[in-house]
Image (tube, rainbow, N blue to C red):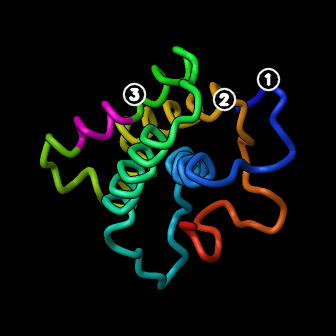
Amino acid sequence: MSGAAAPSHAPDGSAGRLWRVLRSLASEPPAPRRGETPVPGVGENLVLEFDEAYTAFVEGFAALPSEVQLVALQAVDSKLSSMVRAQDAALWTERARREEPVWIEVRGLADRAILAFGWPDGWPDGWPDGWPDGWPS
């Protein structure tokens, strides 16, 4: 993602939680190293975390986001919901998260949501491109 000037710091509170899960959804999982066993359930956990973070964010609105921001979040939510409804176990593997077109689309939608809010499009210094220590807050 590029083009928009991102703030130098991550959002906090419910916005920060939503940003962290969107960053995780926007990040392609790394290929496993030789001999490394992929952690099962990461994709499913991301969907559950997005649902909880999105709900908390919407319920905590002090002021309504713009239409562009809401549409961007709804697009992520709709795509993830359709994946759950498909009941296709093959969609939830680490390999699928790296290679399947539906996950590539999810990464793009998550990137667009981050851009719509003007949130940082990368992890702050010191965070790996993945789950920060202590996540979620």
Q: Whole-Å distance between the Cαs marked 2 and 3?
A: 14 Å
Query: Looking at the rendering, in which quadrant would you find the C terminus?
Result: bottom right
Q: Is residue 133 magenta?
A: no
Query: In which quadrant of the rendered view does residue 40 lie?
Result: bottom left
For residue 14, side relative to residue 3 (left or right): left
Asked if the residue under mark 3 is in contact with the one under mark 2, i.e. CB atoms within 8 Å, the reply is: no
Q: Residue at x 49, y 31 (%)?
A: 109
Q: Return the residue at label 2.
A: 115
Q: Return the residue at label 3.
A: 74
Q: Amino acid at mark 2?
A: Leu
Query: Looking at the rendering, in which quadrant would you find the N terminus?
Result: top right
Q: Which secondary structure class fits the magenta region best? A: helix
Looking at the rendered structure, the secondary structure element under dot 1 is loop
Q: Which mark is residue 29?
A: none
Q: Which mark is residue 3?
A: 1
- Mark 3 residue crowding within 10 angstroms, few (<14) / some (14–19) / many (20+): some
Q: Residue furthest front?
A: 62
Asked if the residue under mark 2 is in contact with the one under mark 1, i.e. CB atoms within 8 Å, the reply is: yes
Q: Whole-Å distance between the Cαs marked 3 and 1?
A: 22 Å
Residue 47 at what x, y percent from top left?
A: 35, 52
Among the two numbered marks 3 and 1 on one chain, the one whose residue lies closer to the N terminus: 1
Among the two numbered marks 2 and 3 on one chain, the one whose residue lies closer to the N terminus: 3
Residue range of the region highlighted in magenta in the rendering: 77-83
Q: Residue furthest top?
A: 67
Residue 87 at what x, y percent from top left?
A: 12, 48
